[in-house]
Amino acid sequence: MAAFELRYARAFQQVTAAQGMNLDAVRSQLEDFAATFDASHNLREFLLNPALPQADKLKVLDAVAARVGLDKTVRNFIAVLMDHGRMHFLREIAAEYSALADEANSIAEVEITSAKPLQSDERNLLESKASELAGGKVRVTWAEDAALLGGAVIRLGSSVYDGSVRGQLQGLKAHLAGV
């Protein structure tokens, strides 16, 4: 990932924070526009076409912004990306903004992988444990991997907490090999 993506995201995060905007609402709007941009081939082709006048692109941006309910600040940020030729990187810039918003809100990104689909009470228990490990709020991404055999693995930053049956069997194997 190029450094400019983080620079754009950081500048936008500073603007939205200075204006007292809800960072989660801004994140949602930016992600909604990015999804619309990704899903619509015609919109993408139009906004990325260097031969078209910027004024025409801004009219289309305004129409889409009105339809998806973008705040003026979010709309203006997207216009800056268009003007600077950075729309190809909208998804990456939005991801960087999301990470900065999480950091500002003291939210840790956690991935929890289980061997099978979990019931809501099991998910709540694991999310609570992840929150305890992180020392605060967490945003959980759920995944399944049957190779775990049972249990779950929690990834928090560079730390991995392996409570899976596979992990326990590997630990037992290593212990027995060392005996």
Image (spheres, grey):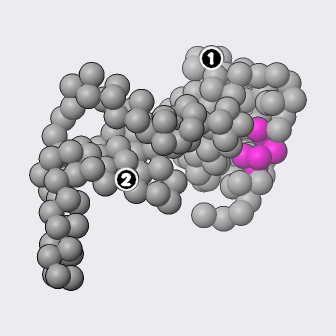
Coordinates of residue 65 in the picture (x, y in percent): 65, 23
Coordinates of residue 115 in the picture (x, y in percent): 18, 46
Q: Is residue 28 above or below residue 37?
A: above
Magenta region, main secondary structure: helix
Residue beneath disc 2: 161
Residue 98 occupies quadrant = top right
Q: Quadrant of the N terminus?
A: bottom right
Coordinates of residue 6 in the picture (x, y in percent): 71, 54
Residue lying furthest right? 18
Side of 134 where 6 appears, left or right: right
Task: Looking at the image, tell me whether mark 2 or mark 1 is earlier in sequence order.
Answer: 1
Callouts 2 and 1 close, C-beta under 8 Å: no
Q: Is residue 138 above or below residue 72?
A: below
Residue 114 occupies quadrant = top left
Query: What kind of residue is marked 2?
Result: Tyr
Residue at image location 71% in from the left, 37% down from the top: 104
Query: What kind of residue is marked 1?
Result: Gly
Distance from label 2 to label 1 (Cα)?
40 Å
Residue 58 occupies quadrant = top right
Q: Is residue 15 magenta?
A: no
Q: Nearer the viewer, mark 2 or mark 1?
A: 2
Residue beneath disc 1: 69
Side of 145 where 157 appears, left or right: right
Q: Secondary structure at mark 1?
A: loop
